[in-house]
Structures are given as structure tokens and as C-alpha cells.
Image: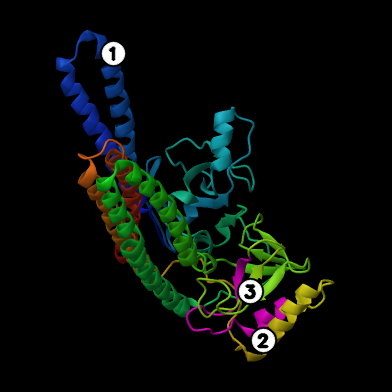
Amino acid sequence: MKVRRPYFDRLVPLVFGMLLLAGAVGIAYGLMDIAWVGLFLSAAAVALGLATGGRLVRDAVVPFRVDVDSHGLSVRIPKLNRHLLWDEVAAVVLADAPATADAPATAVRRMLRGPRLLLVPAAGVSLGVPLTEKSPVDGQAAVELFELGEVAYKEDQFTRDLALLAGERFHPLFRPPIPPTSGVPLRHFPDQTDRARLKRWLDRRRALLFVGWYLLVLVPLLSLTIVATQHKELLGGIVLVVSLVVVGIVTTVVRHFTESCRDLLDDEARIDGTDLVIGAGPESPRISLVSGIVTVRQPGQLKGFGEAWVLARSADEEPPVPVLLLADPRTGLLRDRDDLRALEAVLRDSADERDRAAGRQLDELASQAPTSVASPARPSAGAQPSRVHATALWQASKGVGRAVVLLGVVVTVMIAGGWVVEETTVVGPALIVSAIGMFVVWIVYAVYRVVVLLRALLMLVARVFR
């Protein structure tokens, strides 16, 4: 059992720390040419850069290795560097952060801390460091090794592995955020293989819609704005305003068309009493199945869902809101029969005819649906296989590709503005300013996508060398 800090969590502080140190050195070098008026502020900036950057770099490069086997554990962390046999260890405790009445800032910091691992040495064994903590098991003095959120290990996998190696010495006393267990959990749909195919299908459809939006909406409207501006600037201004409205409306429609189906793919769902609960958290949204707002939508009735039957929330005078996929949008394959029967059992007892009608529709679908032998339980949260990391890397690469493609939109607007900037006093500069604003937003998006890509790459490399 090898416990390490995530490589990404070390790389980011290292990079930012090096940037801060370089900036501080640069400012210090420039102090020779600064008048005495700005000397104090420059010196403060240098001190802050050196202190913050040095701390980040130190935290990134400091050794952090905890190896556990059947003989004992080897700890090499900033506060402790020691190899201990199990006979020298009284207990290892995975416990919550203590609730104390500290000062407000400290109290907030403790509230945000996750479970932490405490080491209690055996009687007569000195660790050479202060034992500042107390074991929640019996009050013995202990040292905190690390917080579980600091390391690249899933909580349930960490608990299983450490319990196997430490035996009776291990005490898991933390309270993990366990999703509510009441109700009937519905299976993940589609399953992992079909979900991957469905996401590829959605990606291709999104790419085609983007090309259509670019060639049939953006470029024609910009061209029309240029022609109108060259004829008369007032006319060009009117066309520009109308074009902005049209582009905004079409963009919103296209985004809703491409993202509404994807939003339902990874949602967990369960039936709790007469409610359909979307999500795993205690504050997850609930949709009542007996209040007359649930309908079953056939393929084609909701745009963007392909061949899927969809369970939707549809109040009077409001557009339907999809809440659960009943069939695969790509193939039309129905959800598992047991899931459909569970939904139908709630709807058929409703006092509202609309709910009972939806239940009858589900009953018809259930008679055609397959029966799965798989358990509705969710996939294990343990160590993820390399294929998962490779898939994450591929998805992150596609995100960077989308950022590169979106740069073309910014360049197109900039070219349109440059085309008429010398002939107009309003339209051309307005297009240039719009392009600059779009470029700033694009930079933020591109940096985010690159960071996600680097994280996925580092996680894959870490998996290979772990």
C-alpha cells in the first residue's frame, strides 16, 4: 500500500511558486531604477512574492511517502521521517477533524477539513516529534500524519487496504458523506459501453451543429453587416444589432439542443416514496410522481433527444423539462424493465389522471424492455483502471480541441471589424471591442482546458508509475 500526494496537486503549486519567485526576483532587480517613493511598495511586493512563492515551492518538493505493508509502515512526510514495525504502533485511527470553539478563521478551517489519519505509538516508543493530537478511541497521545483529501487514494479503497494490513490496530471512526439509502435506486443508463458510444454520437452531432452555426449564421450575418456598413453606417449599425440578437438566440437554441441530453447521462436517480430523486446528495432535487406534472415523451417530441423516450416534468403553461432517460437517444434501446416497473408502480396509484396515463405508457414500454441481471448498485469508488484515466485524457484533449476551434470565431469577428474599422466610427470599433472581449473570455476558457488536460495527463502517468 503506497500513499502519495496527487502529482497535479504538487505541480500547480510548484509552477505558481516558481512564477512568484521569478516575479519577485524581477522586481528586486528593477529596484535599482525605482525612485525612493515607490521603494517601500516594491520591497513589500518582493517580500510577499518570496514568502508565498517559497512556501508553494517548498510544499511541492517536500518528500511525501507513506508505505504500508504486513510488517509495518514507513513514513516520510514533513513532520515525521520514521520506519515503524507494527509492534511499535498501538493504533492508527481515521477520524474526523475535531469540532472546537476556536477563533472564527480557525474554526472555519477545521470545518472544511476532511478525515485525517492519526498514528498512536505503542507504550515506550518515541517518534521524536510532539504528539499534539488525542486518539478519539481512548484519548492516547497521537500525531496526525495527513488528511485523506491530500493523497491520491479513494476513501473506501484506503479503508479496505489499511484494515487488511493493520488489522485490529486500525479504527475507522470518520463519518463519510454517505448518499441516502432510502428508496429504490435506478440503474445507470445507458451502461458504460453504450454511454461511451452515446457520448461519441453526441460529440459528432455537436460538431456538425457548430459547423452549421458558423457557416450558416455567424459568417453570413457578419458579411451582411460589412456590406450594409459600406453602404451606409447607420444601416450597418442596425444590421449589427439585429445580428447580435439573432446570433444570441440561435446560440442559446443550439447549446440547449446539444447539452440537454448530455446533462442526463451521468445523473444518479432513485425512487424515494412517491418522489423521483435526481442525484446522490441529501439536497438532491425531488420530483413528485403523484402531483400531476409527470409525462412520458415519445421520440421526437423533445428536441435533442434522438430516439429516446423521456420522463419529463410538464406543468401547465410551461415547457416540459426532461428529468430521466427511458431509452437510449442513439439506438432507442429501452431502460431496464425493473426500473420502468418501479416508476409505473408509483404513478398508477396517483390520484391525478395525467400521472396514471404516464404509468400506463410506462407499463407498455416495460413489456418491450429488456431485463438486466446486473445489480443496480453503483460502480465501486475504488482504484480506477488505466482505461478510465485514458478516457479522461481523451475527453480533456477534445476540450482543448474545442478551444482551438472557438478561437476561429474570435478571429472571424476580428477580421470583420478590421474590414470596416477605417470606414466607420461606430460599427468597426464595436466589432473590434467585441472581438477583444471574446478573446479575453477565450483565454480563460483555454487556460481551463489546458489545466484539465495536464491534470488528466499527470493522472495517467501517475497510474503507470504507481
Residue where numbered disc 1 is placed: 40
Q: Residues within 10 Å of mark 3 (few under 14, many from 20)?
A: many
Image vertical order of residue 233 relative to residue 50, above or below = below
Residue where numbered disc 3 is placed: 186
Mark 3 secondary-structure assignment: loop
Q: Can residue 15 be seen by looking at this rendering?
A: yes
Q: Which label's residue is closer to the chain start, 2 or 1?
A: 1
Q: Position of residue 74 (x, y in %)?
A: 39, 53
Q: Which label's residue is closer to the chain start, 3 or 1?
A: 1
Residue where numbered disc 2 is placed: 366
Q: Can residue 63 be seen by looking at this rendering?
A: no
Answer with the quarter of the image where residue 384 lies: bottom left
Answer with the quarter of the image where residue 297 lies: bottom right
Q: Residue furthest bottom?
A: 368
Question: Who's the residue at 27% across and 50% down the image?
Answer: 226
Specify the segment rendered in magenta: 320-343
Mark 1 secondary-structure assignment: helix
Mark 2 → mark 3, Cα distance in angstroms: 14 Å
Q: Position of residue 289 (x, y in %)?
A: 74, 69
Q: Residues within 10 Å of mark 1 (few under 14, many from 20)?
A: few
- Please name which of the two marks, 2 or 3, marks the residue nearer to the observer: 2
